[in-house]
Image (cartoon, rainbow, N blue to C red):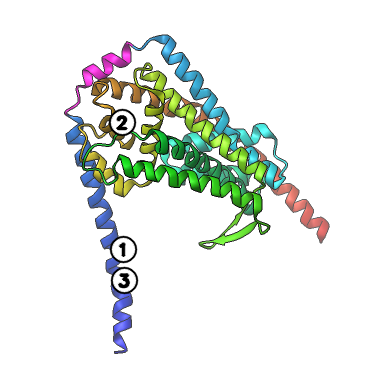
């Protein structure tokens, strides 16, 4: 009996990590195979031809909306600046938020939304507690705004979902009302609760004032509307804006619930570039040809993801260079302060 716990620990240490790695590799290998095989069915010549023939005015309007969205999101961390009272300049905060957001779009939240933001803010002198509060308020602004907009659109303008999906149109409508209730509940808690700090899953959560919460809600919802507006313009207004916005929001849910959504979405659509493209094709291919949808989404990724990434990369390299140049001065200042203390 005494040897069983030891064997259990050995089994857990040796076999379980390898099993998890194998399962993860198998899942993503299957997804990659589905992407490659199904992407071959797309008429890429027509996609590229449609992309090449886009009206310049359409591209300029989409770029202007992208600029507005990126500027708006870059101001999200200003809410945290106001809340925590740190003294970094507003333009510095917006630059950090812009870099983090664009890397988040292209490389995932762990790289851009978390790690990069911590690195940049730490080098600017903020401590971990302040960074966490700033980042929490920013992320809440994004997702509380999502809850409000998705609640209104899903509840009152739910798109028709294909048969066989895990959730139908009626279920999506119910989900919309639940999301709307959650957004309003957040506002209510910020308005009436006297206790402002809570510990949730080991993390401290501080509720903002009602005014700040309302700003979060409005800014987050406005940014999602701008993102929907970019796709709407690139589809050349051939599909109603509420429909485009609702499909974009469904795609956002699918991206967050990756494991559950990818398997159900990709299995039902003849594309597979990604969750965004899969959802749009599954829900809107009866209204527009697939190659036109893909052309609009590729243009969206170029304008909103890749073009800003070039600027974000340059700004990040400049920030790193400045930090390296100022590091010796900071170390000398710290050493001088230590001598004075001695």
For the residues carrying marks 2 and 3, which lies nearer the camera in this image?
2
What is the quadrant of the N terminus in the image? bottom left
From the viewer's perspective, tell me whether residue 118 is left or right of residue 258.
right
Q: Which residue occupies the foreground of this view, 73 or 288?
A: 288
Q: Position of residue 239 (x, y in %)?
A: 35, 21
Q: Can you tell which mark lies on residue 17?
A: 1
Q: Which residue occupies the foreground of this view, 151 or 89?
A: 151
Instruction: State if disc 2 and disc 1 touch (CB < 8 Å).
Output: no
Is residue 303 visible in this depiction of the protein?
A: no
Q: Which residue occupies the foreground of this view, 215 or 243?
A: 243
What is the quadrant of the C terminus in the image? bottom right
Seen at 25% across and 21% down, the residue is: 291
For the residues carrying marks 1 and 2, which lies nearer the camera in this image?
2
Q: Please identify the dominant SS of the magenta region.
A: helix
From the viewer's perspective, tell me whether residue 80 is left or right of residue 60.
right
Is residue 80 positioned above or below 199 on the image? above
Circle 2 residue:
280
In what element is the residue under mark 3? Answer: helix
Q: Which residue occupies the foreground of this view, 199 or 322?
A: 199
Is residue 132 positioned above or below 54 on the image? below
**Region rendered in magenta:** 41-53
Q: Position of residue 314 (x, y in %)?
A: 52, 29
Tell me where residue 138 sits by quadrant. top right
Circle 3 residue:
12
Seen at 23% across and 17% down, the residue is: 46
């Amino acid at each position: 009996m005494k040897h069983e716990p030891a064997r259990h620990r050995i089994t857990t240490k040796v076999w379980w990590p390898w099993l998890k790695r194998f399962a993860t590799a198998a899942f993503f290998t299957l997804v990659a195979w589905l992407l490659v095989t199904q992407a071959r069915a797309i008429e890429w010549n027509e996609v590229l031809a449609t992309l090449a023939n886009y009206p310049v005015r359409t591209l300029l309007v989409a770029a202007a909306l992208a600029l507005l969205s990126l500027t708006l999101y870059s101001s999200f961390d200003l809410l945290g600046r106001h809340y925590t009272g740190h003294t970094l300049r507003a333009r510095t905060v917006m630059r950090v938020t812009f870099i983090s957001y664009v890397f988040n779009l292209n490389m995932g939240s762990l790289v851009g939304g978390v790690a990069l933001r911590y690195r940049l803010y730490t080098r600017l002198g903020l401590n971990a507690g302040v960074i966490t509060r700033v980042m929490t308020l920013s992320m809440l602004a994004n997702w509380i705004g999502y809850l409000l907009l998705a609640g209104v659109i899903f509840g009152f303008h739910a798109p028709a979902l294909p048969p066989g999906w895990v959730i139908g149109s009626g279920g999506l409508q119910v989900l919309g009302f639940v999301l709307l209730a959650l957004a309003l509940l957040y506002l209510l808690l910020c308005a009436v609760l006297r206790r402002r700090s809570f510990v949730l899953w080991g993390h401290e959560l501080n509720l903002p004032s009602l005014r700040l919460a309302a700003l979060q809600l409005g800014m987050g919802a406005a940014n999602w509307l701008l993102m929907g507006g970019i796709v709407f313009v690139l589809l050349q207004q051939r599909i109603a804006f509420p429909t485009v916005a609702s499909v974009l929001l469904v795609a956002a849910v699918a991206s967050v619930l990756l494991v559950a959504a990818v398997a159900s979405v990709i299995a039902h659509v003849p594309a597979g570039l990604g969750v965004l493209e899969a959802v749009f094709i599954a829900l809107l291919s009866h209204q527009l040809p697939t190659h036109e949808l893909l052309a609009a989404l590729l243009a969206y990724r170029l304008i909103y993801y890749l073009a800003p990434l070039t600027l974000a990369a340059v700004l990040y390299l400049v920030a790193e260079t400045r930090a390296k140049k100022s590091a010796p001065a900071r170390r000398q200042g710290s050493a001088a302060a230590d001598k004075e203390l001695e």
